[in-house]
Image: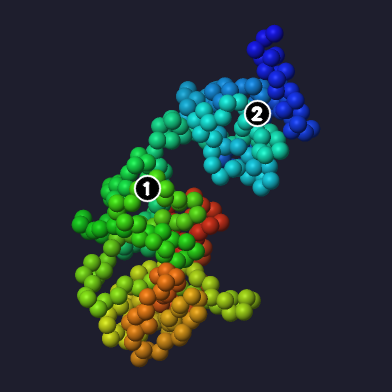
Amino acid sequence: MSWTVKMETQMGPWLESLGSRTIRPGWVVRFRSLEKSKEDEFCLELSKLHTYDDVVERVANHLGLDDPSKIRLTSHNCYSQQPKPQPIKYRGVDHLSDMLVHYNQTSDILYYEVLDIPLPELQGLKTLKVAFHHATKDEVVIHTIRLPKQSTVGDVINDLKTKVELSHPSAELRLLEVFYHKIYKIFPHNEKIENINDQYWTLRAEEIPEEEKNLGPHDRLIHVYHFMKDTTQNQVVQNFGEPFFLVIHEGEALADVKMRVQRKLQVPDEEFSKWKFAFLSLGRPEYLQDSDIVSNRFQRRDIYGAWEQYLGLEHSDNAPKRSYAANQNRHTFEKPVKIYN
C-alpha cells in the first residue's frame, strides 16, 4: 500500500466527521489577496495532503514568484466570513486540510500576501504601524517599523527619527498608546516591543514640546480631549478628534489656558467662541468659567487612570474623517494621512 493511499485510509473517518463539505483529494481552493479580501483572484486544484511547502510553492508558481518563502497565507473564518486575525506561520501547519478547517467548518478560501522579505526572516521581526504627528505640519504619516523582537521602544524611536521630518535636529520623540480618542499610555524607552499590540490601539509618535521638558514644581501635565454629548443616548459624553497633552501652571485661569489651546490648535475666533471647556472625571463634565483656576480641578489623584480625568473641549465634530488604512473601522485621524511602508 502506497504512503498516500495509507494516509487516505487513516484519515478517512476523521475527514468524514467534518460533514458534507469534506476536503476532497482534488480540492479547488479559491485564493484572495489579503488586501482585497472579498474578491476571488484565482483558483488552484490541490490535494488535501499537500504540505505547507507544496501549497506556497504552487501559489508562487501561479504568481510568477521565484521565492515561495515570500508567500504568507491566512485562513478563512467561516463564521465572520473574513480572514482570521493571525496569518499562518511559516510551516505552522502540516497539510492543506489544516489550513481550511475552522472548528467544525471547512472552507475553500485562503488569503495570500506577497512579502518583501522571506516569511521566516519576517517572523523574527516585530512589525509596528506608527502614526507620526508632525509638530508643525497639519498631517499624520503612517510608518511601518520592523525591528528584532527583543528591541525596545527607544529603538523604535531611533529608527523613526531616520524616517521623519523633525522640527529641529535635537527634537525628542515619544510613543503613545491611543484608543478611541484618549491617550492611555506613554511608553517608557526601555519597554520591550515584542508584546506591544498595534491591532487595536493606535501607536502615535510625536515630538515632546519644549515646555513639557521644563516643568516647574507646581506645573501639571494634563490630558485634553475633544468631546460632544450624544443627544440620542441621554447626553452621554463621546470623545472624538486628536487627544493631546497640555501644561497648566499653578494659579492659571481658564481664560489664559483657552488662549494657549486656541493658539495650539489654530482655531478661528468665530468658531472658538462656541467652544465650551469642562473638567471631566469618569465621563461627568463640570463646566468651567474663564475666571476658574484650572489647576485646582487637577489636585486629586484619580485611581481609575489619568485618561479618565481631563480637560474637555466641547464642540461639534466638523472635521472629515480619514481612516487609518492599516486598521480600518477602528480609528480615524482628523489630519491628512500619508502611509509609508
Left or right: 222 in relation to 313 = left
Q: What whole-number distance in Å separates the C-alpha atoms at marks 2 and 1? A: 34 Å
Q: Residue at x 49, y 51 (%)?
A: 199
The quadrant in which the N terminus is found is top right
Q: Nearer the viewer, residue 333 or 202?
A: 202
Q: Is residue 43 above or below residue 197?
A: above
In the rendering, at what x and y percent does residue 122 appear?
42, 35
Residue on which disc 1 sits? 193
Look at the image and tell me whether residue 264 can be seen. no
Q: Can residue 51 be spotted in the picture?
A: yes
Snapshot colouring: rainbow
- Please rate how many residues cluster around mark 2, counting C-alpha atoms within 10 Å: few if below 14, some from 14 to 19, many from 20: many
User: Residue 251: x and y, percent?
Assistant: 28, 86
Q: Is residue 100 above or below residue 182?
A: above
Label 2 SS: helix
On the picture, is 38 further left or further right than 219? Answer: right
What residue is disc 2 on? Answer: 97
Q: Residue furthest bottom?
A: 291
Residue at disc 1, secondary structure: loop
Q: Quadrant of residue 264?
A: bottom left
* Residue shown at the point (68%, 42%) measured from the top left: 78
Q: Tell me the amino acid under the disc marked 2.
A: Ser
Residue 235 to residue 25: above or below: below
Total label count? 2
Q: Which residue is located at x 72 percent, y 18 percent? A: 9
Label 1: how many Cα within 10 Å (few below 14, some 14–19, many 20+): many
Residue 57: where, in percent of width, then height?
Answer: 54, 23
